[in-house]
Image: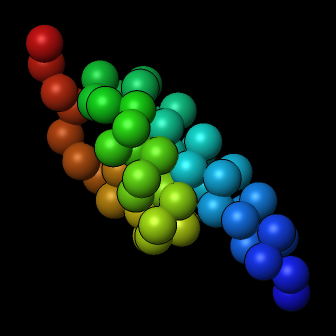
Amino acid sequence: MSLYVYLAIGVLLGAAGSYIAEKRGRSHIEGFALGFLLGFIGLLIESILPKKNN
């Protein structure tokens, strides 16, 4: 596959991680990084992390 396909998939998973993190009260940058770098495992990690109370 092309590098652009991998990059697009990473960005989509990063966006999903960012969304999950925002819903759980965590940093959207943290969620994006986990989703982008770790893929589906990052999304799973982000959904398991406890909610952050502010």
Left or right of residue 31, residue 53 in this image: left
Q: Residue at x 54, y 67 (%)?
A: 40
Farthest-out residue, top: 54
- In the image as oriented, which residue stretches furthest toward the left? 54
Residue 44: image x %, image y %?
Answer: 42, 60
Q: Is residue 22 left or right of residue 19?
A: left
In the rendered image, the vertical position of residue 13 relative to residue 27, given as above or below: below
Q: Is residue 53 above or below residue 48?
A: above
Measuring 83% from the left and 70% from the top, which residue is drawn there?
5
**Image quadrant where residue 52 sits:** top left
Residue 6 x, y percent position in the rendering: 74, 73
Residue at point 78%, 77% (across, down): 3
Query: Residue 1: percent from the left, percent from the top?
Result: 86, 87
Q: Residue furthest front?
A: 3
Q: Position of residue 51 (x, y in %)?
A: 22, 31
Question: Does 54 sit above or below residue 21?
Answer: above
